Image (cartoon, rainbow, N blue to C red):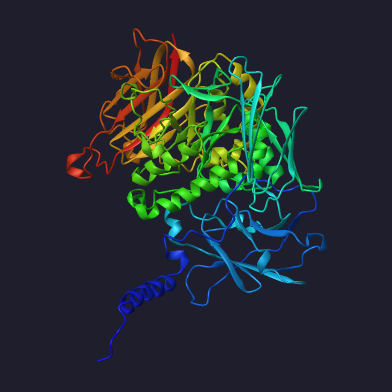
């Protein structure tokens, strides 16, 4: 028998592992989410003729295995300018897609999965003299699709670009621009510059607010830090978004300038104290929208003029904050810095489709990679006031580790995660969605702020009074309103039904009276939370001062309908605090149309939407003579003899139980069907 080496079996075992590993494609291996990429960094593109847009278009094609899903393919030839000789060449893809493979001259260069943060590769060693070819292949889905929103085809139109860097270059910049808390008028600058690993000398010079900073470089001097105190600074806020230019110049050993970078920074001091945001020592009220992923790509990944116009429309309507559903384009953050829009910047992580991944340690590195990409790119923007770990209602070990990871990187901003609810891995208590049960104030025995999410399903007329009420200090986000966000940004026309008579005229009149309505003391319903959502979604509702929803055939009245609901609740947010007078609700009663009045109507009220009064029953003023009487409007009313000043009203409609059995119902009612005609609230 032939003798075998004692190392034969271990080597055979390792060879088998290697073979199996290579046989598994990157796109279905959770351990592979990036390959040969440049480390994420701030946008530090040098000034000059060092950027080359490749242009071209992405095309959809069906792969050779004839799967049902189409792939995105990009291919283009290019030649480098003669001026780029002897320099490094970086290929950058602003939004790489679900799972992207990169090829240069038919050689595979790298792979990435994070679809909404830039991907860069150093392709210098893959280039040849003369003409070169770049090719990209984007798969429609991969294992990483389990932890992100579906990739949207519109952002695949962003073509790659080439960036030329000197052999010794600035690879990253970290800017901490805060304020001295003694007067909030003296800026404090902590600047950290990261150079690549080929430093042999030279110097770095920085200019900011008339100050000139300089530091000489020694061989292998890869990191340097500069500090400065700058008096007479105008603090950055959402109402005064003042930015200062910061110029960084790199010189070689012979004193020649090899690279120049200009950043625009704002000086602000943000802290959470006693459950409140304090910006530059003053309480900060957030009147924001939590953007829905539906339609957000149009707003967050558009061209610069349309994004700037959208931000300005938000600000004109009193909206000062957005909770993003995923990372936006790089230009979006520069515009928010200059126009004063506050951001909850969310990583490209979404776990609703596969909630089990938050408990699976195999997915931790992929989640941390997406957080790291977001943090390194956006950390120098004053408009980013909070980090969000992602979207989803599930919380687990991976999200707890992600919180600790991000807090270790940045302790100047709060880290939030709606799925954490009251757990420790969020600095601000947010409900996962507007329909989630909000924790009561008694359960919040800590200093964390509580920011409620109000559900909205209406146009901008609903939002204006609540946003414009500067007398209220309660922060809030309106949630689940894709139609509202994109219409306020001016990107889509009104979603009112095309056959609604006079809908355009009504919209114009409401727009002309926006300022008067916002400044008026007239009592009005500013926002409504509906649980469950109404079935009459075909009529895109509008808020009126004298009713809940507008009937397009009769703008003086409103109506909204529910079917098959045991209980319907409405939480109405008024435009100011009042002592409540009479409250009434008109309910249509038409057995011929299977519309029945509720078995009971109850009401309660609250000053802040947390601690509620007890339930009180509304009395019906004009009951039908028999349950089968047709076409009757039932009016339920209640006049509280005493109420504290309240801003939130909660109405509850308890529906009768119809079994659908003709023998059990005098009018053969097949199902419950509630139709609210109008709700009125008066002030004492």
Image quadrant occupied by the C terminus:
top left
**Residue furthest out toward the bottom:** 1
- Residue 588 position, x and y percent, is 37, 31
Identify the residue at horizontal 45%, vertical 69% (top origin): 25
Identify the residue at horizontal 56%, vertical 42% (top origin): 495
- Residue 523 position, x and y percent, is 51, 16
Eyeballing the image, is 598 above or below 259?
Answer: above
Identify the residue at horizontal 74%, vertical 59% (top origin): 87
**Residue furthest out toward the left:** 663
Q: Is residue 532 visible?
A: no
| Closer to the camera in the image, 68 or 681 | 68
Q: Is residue 176 visible?
A: yes
In the picture, measured across the screen, residue 502 lies left or right of residue 132, that is left
In the picture, measured across the screen, residue 338 lies left or right of residue 370, that is right
Eyeballing the image, is 431 above or below 280?
Answer: below
Identify the residue at horizontal 82%, vertical 63% (top origin): 82
- Residue 103 position, x and y percent, is 61, 69
């Amino acid at each position: 028998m032939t003798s075998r080496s004692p190392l034969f079996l271990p080597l055979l075992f390792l060879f088998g592992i290697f073979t199996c590993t290579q046989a598994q494609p990157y796109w279905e291996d959770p351990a592979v989410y990036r390959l040969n990429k440049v480390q994420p960094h701030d946008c530090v593109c040098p000034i000059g003729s060092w950027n080359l847009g490749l242009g071209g278009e992405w095309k959809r094609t069906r792969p050779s295995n004839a799967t049902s899903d189409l792939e995105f393919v990009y291919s283009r030839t290019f030649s480098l300018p003669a001026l780029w000789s002897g320099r490094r060449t970086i290929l950058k893809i602003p939004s790489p897609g679900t799972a992207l493979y990169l090829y240069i001259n038919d050689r595979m260069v790298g792979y990435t999965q994070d679809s909404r943060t830039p991907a860069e590769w150093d392709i210098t060693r893959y280039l040849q003299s003369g003409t070169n070819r770049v090719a990209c292949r984007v798969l429609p889905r991969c294992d990483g699709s389990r932890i992100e929103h579906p990739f949207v085809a519109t952002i695949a139109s962003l073509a790659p670009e080439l960036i030329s860097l000197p052999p010794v270059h600035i690879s990253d910049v970290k800017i901490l621009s805060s304020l001295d808390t003694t007067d909030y008028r003296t800026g404090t600058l902590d600047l950290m510059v990261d150079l690549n690993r080929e430093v042999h000398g030279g110097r770095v010079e920085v200019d900011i607010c008339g100050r000139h900073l300089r530091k000489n470089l020694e061989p292998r001097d890869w990191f340097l830090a500069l500090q400065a105190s700058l008096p007479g600074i105008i603090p950055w806020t959402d109402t005064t978004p003042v930015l200062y230019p910061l110029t960084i110049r790199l010189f070689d050993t012979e004193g020649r300038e090899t690279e120049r970078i200009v950043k625009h920074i704002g000086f602000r001091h943000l802290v959470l104290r006693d459950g409140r945001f304090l910006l530059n020592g003053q309480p900060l009220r957030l009147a924001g929208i939590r953007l829905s992923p539906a339609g957000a790509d149009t707003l967050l990944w558009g061209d610069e003029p349309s994004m700037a116009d959208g931000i300005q429309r938000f600000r004109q309507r009193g909206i000062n904050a957005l909770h993003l559903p995923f990372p936006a384009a790089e230009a979006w953050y520069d515009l928010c810095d200059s126009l004063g829009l506050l951001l909850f910047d969310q990583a490209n992580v979404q776990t609703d489709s596969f909630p089990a991944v938050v408990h699976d340690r195999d997915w931790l590195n992929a989640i941390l990679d997406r957080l790291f990409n977001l943090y390194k790119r956006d950390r120098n923007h004053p408009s980013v006031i909070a980090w969000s770990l992602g979207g989803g209602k599930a919380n687990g070990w991976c999200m707890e580790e992600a919180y600790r990871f991000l807090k270790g990187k940045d302790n100047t901003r709060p880290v939030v995660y709606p799925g954490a609810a009251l757990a420790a891995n969020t600095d601000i208590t947010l409900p996962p969605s507007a329909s989630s049960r909000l924790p009561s104030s008694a359960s919040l025995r800590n200093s964390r702020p509580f920011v409620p999410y109000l559900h909205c399903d209406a146009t901008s007329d609903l939002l204006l009074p609540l946003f414009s009420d500067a007398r209220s200090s309660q922060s809030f986000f309106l949630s689940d309103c894709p139609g509202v966000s994109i219409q306020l940004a001016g990107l889509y026309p009104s979603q009112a039904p095309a056959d609604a008579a006079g809908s355009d005229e009504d919209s114009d009149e409401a727009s002309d009276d926006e300022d008067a309505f916002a400044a008026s003391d007239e009592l009005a319903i500013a926002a409504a939370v509906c649980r469950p959502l109404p079935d009459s979604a075909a009529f895109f509702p509008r808020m009126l001062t004298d009713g809940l929803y507008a009937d397009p055939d009769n703008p003086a009245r409103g109506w909204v309908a529910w079917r098959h609901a045991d209980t319907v609740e409405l939480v109405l947010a008024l435009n100011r605090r009042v002592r409540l007078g009479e409250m009434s609700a008109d309910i249509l009663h038409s057995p011929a149309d299977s519309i029945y009045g509720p078995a009971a109507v109850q009401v309660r009220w609250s000053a802040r939407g947390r601690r509620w009064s007890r339930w009180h029953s509304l009395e019906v003023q004009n009951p039908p003579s028999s349950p089968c009487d047709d076409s009757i409007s039932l009016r339920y009313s209640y006049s509280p003899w005493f109420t504290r000043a309240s801003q939130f009203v909660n109405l509850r409609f308890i529906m009768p139980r119809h079994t659908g059995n003709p023998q059990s119902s005098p009018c053969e009612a097949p199902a419950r069907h509630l139709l609210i005609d109008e709700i009125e609230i008066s002030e004492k």
